Image: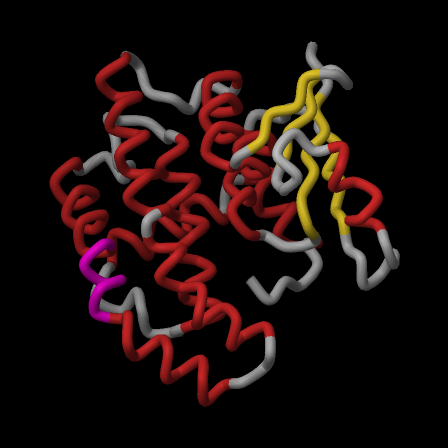
Amino acid sequence: MPSYTLYNFNTRGRIEFVRYMLLHADVPFDDFRIDSQLVPGQWDEYKPKMPMGQLPVLEVDGKDMIPQSLAIGRFVAKKTKNYGSNDLEAAHIDAFIESAADILPKLYPTIRAIFTSNDDLKNEEWTKIREDITKHLNLFETTLQKNGSGWLVGNKLSAADFYIGELVDRLEGHIDSTILNDFPHLKKLKSAIANLPRVKDYIATRAKSIW
């Protein structure tokens, strides 16, 4: 079996869904967290070793290093059989993940306010984009309702469910506790992902993260 090391900053961020997929598939991996607040200069030490000078990065067998969260996610989804039953399903999985990833840049001003503990600014920035974010969520909600399987693509769990279930959990937990009130299927998806046995065990012991 290949060996995996996942490098990221000490946060959930863009890569948490990959951790979930590996955990759910019971694939061992080294979860290497870089935190220059705890270890001064740690990122300066590791940055030159990263292919694009940024995180996250997945190292395979101690030699091949894959940068970029979506590329890592696609690789791990294939390895853990979370990439659909055929090429068409795989394309739809990609589409949902990319649509959800489009949300993240819109959230950056809100996230920066969270990191500076400025609640007034957080609420101000969130108010500007909330309606736009709910349009994305409505697309996912409608798909879940129409599909009827509890999952976004086909009749089984996929990388899209991991990505979106984890993302809406962060939205609800860190930005707006009411965001899922009008999206019962998304709320159910979030719960389904969080209650997968190995994921649930991980969450129970996971260090608190601002985002």
Q: Give the range drawn in magenta.
A: 131-136
Q: Which residue lies furthest to the left in this view?
A: 146
Judging depth in this view, the residue of 28 and 35 nearest the camera is: 35
| Residue 32, horizontal then vertical, whole percent | 76, 40
Q: Is residue 63 above or below residue 17?
A: above
| Residue 131, horizontal then vertical, whole percent | 21, 69
Residue drawn 72% across the image and 38% down it: 31
Q: In this view, does 71 lie above or below 54?
A: above
Judging depth in this view, the residue of 127 and 201 nearest the camera is: 127
The quadrant in which residue 179 appears is: bottom left
Residue drawn 22% across the image and 64% down it: 132
| Residue 136, horizontal then vertical, whole percent | 23, 54
| Left or right side of 166 for 187 | left
User: Does 132 appear in magenta?
Assistant: yes
Q: In this view, does 180 lie above or below 101?
A: below
Q: Main secondary structure of the magenta part?
A: helix
Residue drawn 70% across the image and 38% down it: 7
Judging depth in this view, the residue of 28 and 117 nearest the camera is: 117
| Left or right side of 163 for 151 | left
User: Does 119 appear in magenta?
Assistant: no
Q: Which residue lies furthest to the bottom in this view?
A: 120
Q: Could you tell me how many numbered marks the image carries?
A: 0
Residue drawn 40% across the image and 55% down it: 104
Q: How is the image coloured?
A: secondary structure
Judging depth in this view, the residue of 207 and 200 nearest the camera is: 207
| Left or right side of 79 for 141 | left
Position of the N terminus, as image quadrant, is top right
| Residue 168, horizontal then vertical, whole percent | 39, 56
Position of the C terminus, as image quadrant, is bottom right
